[in-house]
Image: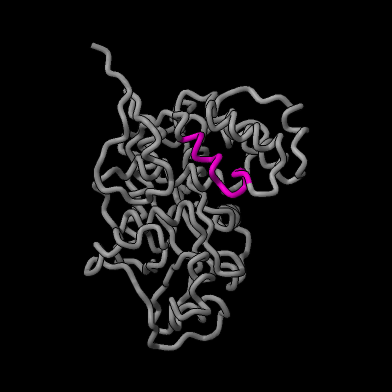
Amino acid sequence: MTPTAREAPRGRDYWAGCGYRHLTVGADGRLTVTDAFLRAYLLRPELAPVPASCDAELALSDALTASPRRAVSEREIAAIRDEDARENYRVWLRFRDRLAGAPSLEAAYSRLFQGDGVDVPPVFVHELTQVLLRHILGDEADPIEARAAEMLFRVQTVAVLEDGAVMAADEAAVERYATTGGFGTLGELLTTGRTPLRSVDLDVLARENADEYWQRDERHDLSISLNRGQPALDALCRVLERWVHHFLDAEVRIAPQRRIDDERWAWHVGLDAEASAILNDLYNRVDIDDTRMGRLLALFRLDFANPADMRAAIAGRPVHLAMAIDERRRLRLKPQNLLLNLPLARPQ
């Protein structure tokens, strides 16, 4: 008997706003796009009608709500009076066609980074990353892994406190709460970049209060420590391992490392643009000043469980990873880098 698609399983419903419950899971474990998932985009402020919407916009909204996959002509778009509304529909329809034309959400996501480059707004990429991570982590996710996973689709602001603690907080939450006392001293620190106080009024997610995450999973207002030995950095490694396994069907082990001591350095992948540039320069023995080196937050070593999954010329060698902040202390991870740039023996 051939297995059939099933609804996404019921359980702990965190990140409810990402739309995961609108998707189904195929027999291969990949996510299948549904009309309900597409329809949810039509309720976004960029597309939902407003009192000033013209008749043509209202008619198109009603038609797409009834049938999200229906063909839409350029004539229908051109009839919309508001220029911004016209452009928003064009962008969404291009994105919709990408999702609907792929065999799975995973395939649609991977294809975004192939060809001539990403042709949809970054917010759509981040939202797909979130819903895919929601699927990968499952209903019984570890709360610190869930918080670490947020780093893959939400920009983090990073501060180094006087005691050496490296703290990451959601950039949008910092901006939202910094002036209202929601983050106390940390909000001011992260916003202004001034010298931190030794005592900081801050909600930090740790093992002792981990379950608090489930009451705040969509507020994004819990910071984490990225120091070695703290649970968040290890949790990030576990999330990245599962991300690679889900997309590439390759088992890898990722662990933090203090430095790259590898005379036969063969391969590296930056987890963000800053880290990619730094690793490239280190590999090519380009001098890097202290300020730029200070932006490196962490180094990691990735090993394939099965060397046969790697290109034969470097099978068994480690892959060095890194993440780094930019000049404004922002961390912008790009998990797609691990899907595009690992030295796989087979094309994906």
Decide: is 333 above or below 193: above
Front-most of 224 and 302? 224
- Residue drawn at (43%, 81%), measured in percent from left and top? 184
Q: Residue at x 35, y 45 (%)?
A: 241
Which residues lie in the magenta part? 37-49
Q: Nearer the viewer, residue 208 or 95?
A: 95
Is 241 covered by the magenta stretch?
no
Q: Nearer the viewer, residue 251 or 62?
A: 62
Is residue 268 visible in the rendered image? The answer is: no
Q: Is residue 278 left or right of residue 21?
A: right
Q: Is residue 178 above or below residue 248?
A: below
Q: Position of residue 234 (x, y in %)?
A: 31, 58
**305 relative position to 313: left or right:** left
Query: Is any part of residue 231 visible from this angle?
Result: yes
Q: Quadrant of residue 94?
A: top right
Q: Position of residue 221 (x, y in %)?
A: 41, 67
Residue drawn at x 38%, y 51% as measured from the top left: 15
